[in-house]
Image (cartoon, coloured by chain):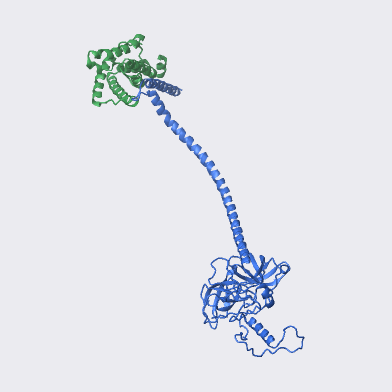
Chain colours: A blue, B green
Amino acid sequence: MDTLLNRNRGIRNITVLLLVIFGQLVLIAVQVRNDQDVRMVRIWSVTAITPLARVLETARDGTAGLFRNYILMHDAREDNRRLQAEVDHLKMENQFLKTELSTADRAKALVAFQQQTQSKTIAARVIAAGAGVTSKVVFVDRGSGSGVEKGMAVVTPDGIVGKVIAAYPTASEVMLVTDPEFAAGVISQKNGVVGTLKGQGQSNCRVDYVPAQEKVDRGEMFYTSGDDRIFPKGFPAGVVRAVNAGMPYQEILLTPTGLAHGLEAVLIVLEGVHQAIPEAPPANAPVYLGKGPASGGEASPPAGSPGTDADKLVEKYKQIGAAENHTFGVGLPGSKPPDFNIKLPAPGAPAAQPAPAHDAAPIKPPGTPKPADGAKTGAVAPPARRAGEPQNPQPQQQ
Amino acid sequence: MTEYGDRYLVGSQREQVSRFRVWVLFLIPLAAILFQVYVPRFFDFLGYLELPLLVTIYFALMRRSQIWGLFTGAVIGLAQDSLSIKQPLGMYGIVKTLVGYFAASVGLRIDVEHSIIRFLLAFFFYFFHQFLYWVLARGLLRRQLPFEIKLTLMLGLLNAIVGVTLFYFLDKLREEA
C-alpha cells in the first residue's frame, strides 16, 4: 500500500516538475529572438511541429500513394485488359482489311487483265476445293449456264491455273496445274525449249520431254505453247526452280505462277487468242499479254511459221482437198476419199510431220475458233514452234 | 507540504524535516538575490558566490520535499532572471528548479545534517547548476558560452565552503520541533 502511494507521489512530483520547466521554457521562448528577429517560441514550435508534420505527411503520402498505386494498378490492369482486347480487335480488323485489300487488288488485276487480254474470258470465283488428298481440283461458280465447257483453260493474270474437267449448270470443276493428271504444252522464254508441263500433286510441277542438250536456266519462265489446244499461247506457266541433268530428258521443276498468290478469282478462257511470248519475264506484275501471233483471212499460219503439228496436218489436208477438188464433210459414207499420199508441189508449204511425242494431245478446246471463225474473232491456230526457231512470231494487229 | 513530508518519510527521517518561519522563507532568498546583484558592484570577487543557489539547495535539502524544492528553485531562479541584464526569464528558473528537485530528492534519502555531506552536495550542485546553465544557453539561446571545468571546479569548492558556513547559520533559523 505504501509502495503504491509512494509511486503515485513520485509520478505527481515529476509531473509538477515537468510542468514548471515547461512553463519556464515557454517563458524563455516568448522572450528570446534569434538572429533573424524571430521569437524562439516560433522557432521551437516550427522545429517541433515540422518533423511531426513531415512524418504525418510521409505517412499520408505513403498511404495515399499506396491507395493511388493500388487504384492505378487496378486501372492499369483494366486498361491492359481493354487495350489487349482492342489490339486483338485491331489485329483482326487489320487482317480483314489486308485480306480485303488483297482481294480487291487481285480483283482489280483480274479485271485489268480481262480487259487487256484478247481472249474472251469470264471471271469466276473459286467456291470449293475437291475431295482427295492428292487431287488438285477446285470448283468455280461459273458453269455451262455461263458458257463454260469442258476443256476450257482457266487462268489468272499471273499464269495458268488449270483446265475445266467438268461443267455443271452453275459450277465447273477445274483441274489445277498441280494435279498429277494435268498436262499442258509449254515453251521456255529464252531459248524456246518445248516441253510438257505436268502436275505432281505437290506445289511444284515438272516439265517433261526436254532433251538433255537443250539449255534451260534456273529462274527462266515457261509459257504456254498453245500446242495442247487448251491454253492459248503466251500465258505464263511457271518459273524454273531446278534443272537436273538426265538422259535422255532433263528433269525440270517448275513453280506455277498462276497459283502463287492464292486462288480466289480466276478467268475461264471461253475463246482463246494466242499471244506472243514476252521478251522479259514478268516481275511481280500482271503479265503483259501481247497481240495474237497471227490473224488474217484464212487463219493460215504465216510463211515460215507452220504452227502446231495438228495445224500442219489440217493445212495439208486442205491442200490435198483443194488439189483433188474434194470438199471435206460433204461426201456420203462409202464415197471415195481423197488420196492423202499425193505430193504437194507448192514450194514453201509445210511438209507433213509426225505427230508430237509429248502428252499434250491436240484437243481442240471448245473455245478454239474454227478457221472460219478465225476471221471473225481474230483467233487463229498458233504456229508450231520448235527449238531454234525465232522466239516471238510477229504478231499482227487486229 | 508538511503533511506530505511527514507521510513520505519513515523512521528517524520523519523527525529530520525542518520547519522555517514564513519570513525566513521570503527574506533569506531575497537577501541572497540582492547580495548577488548588489554586492559585486563593490566587490567583484564576491560575484563568484552563488548565494541564491546555495539557499535553494539548503531549503530543498532541509524541507525534504521535491515539490517544495522545485518551486523554491523556480521562484528564486525567476527572481534572479528578472534582475539579470539581458537574461531571459526562465534560464536560471529552469536550472534552479531542477537543482531544487534533485536536492530535495537527495535530502529524502540521506542525512544532510552532516557538514561533509553538505559540502559535497553544495559542490556537486554548483557544478551541476553551472553545467546545466551552459547546456541550456547553448541549446535554447544558441549562445556560445565557454565552460571552463577547472574554474568551475574551483568556484564549486569556494561555494561549497561558503555553503557549509551559510547552512550552519541558516540552521539557526529553523523552528524547534
Give residue A178's position: percent from left, percent from top.
61, 72
Using residue B145 as the reference point, say whether residue B5 is left or right of it. Answer: right
Name the quadrant containing residue B78: top left
Q: How many marks?
A: 0
Give residue A174's position: percent from left, percent from top.
66, 70
Question: Which quadrant is the N terminus of chain B positioned in?
Answer: top left
Res. A324 visible in picture: yes
Front one among A35 and A321: A321
Vertical position of residue A304 compared to residue A68: above or below? below
Name the quadrant containing residue B112: top left
Using residue B46 as the reference point, say whether residue A65 is left or right of it. Answer: right
Taking the spot 51% from the left edge, 74% from the top edge, the residue there is: A218
Front one among B138 and A116: A116
Front one among B124 and A49: A49
Name the quadrant containing residue B8: top left
Vertical position of residue B72 compared to residue B150: above or below? above
Using residue B39 as the reference point, say whether residue A54 is left or right of it. Answer: right
Give residue A324's position: percent from left, percent from top.
70, 88
Res. B107 visible in picture: no
Front one among A191 and A217: A191
Give residue A352's position: percent from left, percent from top.
63, 86
Vertical position of residue A257 compared to residue A55: above or below? below
